[in-house]
Image (cartoon, rainbow, N blue to C red):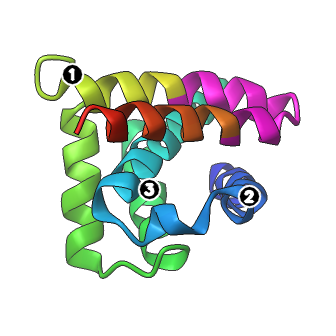
Amino acid sequence: MYDKKVKEMVTSLVPNINKTYFENDMTFQIVGAYLFGMLNGLALDMNVSPNEIQDEMIRTLMDTFYYNESYSVEFTQHLINSTTKAYHPSIHAIIQRGMKGYVLMKEDQIALVVKDIDAIIKVVESAK
């Protein structure tokens, strides 16, 4: 059930995100961290295990974004590690925003989720 909900969420959201974000490693990592937060928000609602979240994130990276298995596993582990604020405070904050984004998705506020992702990327890019 969780896997189907993840797929629904991803297929509803991804087509609305600026396509150029997927062409740049930094912006893709921001989108990935945000999405990981959304998967965690859904998992909390559905009482899903951390292993299931990890599996679905890896599957999403491979099936939706066409990353190879090695990169997908490595990036997912980086995201898991970043749930500890001290590991990577910026990614941690983006994951937290993604969890809030999940609440917006539940309310069919896709445009607000996209706007939030855009705002995060704008801030990060302006800090470069």
Is 38 a magenta residue?
Answer: no
Under circle 1, the secondary element is helix
Image coordinates of residue 100 in percent, x first then y, are 61, 21
| Residue annotated with mark 2 | 16
Q: Nearer the viewer, mark 3 or mark 2?
A: 2
For the residues labelled 2 and 1, say whether their Cβ atoms are less than 8 Å apart: no
**10 Å neighbourhood of mark 3: few (<14), some, or many (≥20)?**
many
Which-is-in-front pick, marks 3 and 1?
A: 1
Residue drawn at x 87%, y 28% is 107
Is any atom of residue 83 visible in this view? no
CA distance separating discs 3 and 2: 19 Å
Which residue does the numbered mark 3 point to in the structure image?
Answer: 57
- Judge whether 105 appears above or below 14 on screen: above
Instruction: Tell whether label 2 touches label 3 (CB within 8 Å).
Output: no
Q: Position of residue 79 (x, y in %)?
A: 28, 42
Residue displayed at 57% across by 41% down: 118
Identity of the amino acid at label 1? Pro
Which amino acid, mark 2? Asn
Q: Earlier in the sequence, mark 3 or mark 1?
A: 3
Report the residue at 71% width, 54% height from top.
Answer: 13
Q: Say whether residue 114 is left or right of residue 57.
A: right
Whether residue 5 sits left or right of residue 98 in the image: it is right
Q: Name the kind of residue labelled 3 in the image.
A: Met
Q: Which residues are magenta?
A: 98-114
The residue that disc 1 covers is 89
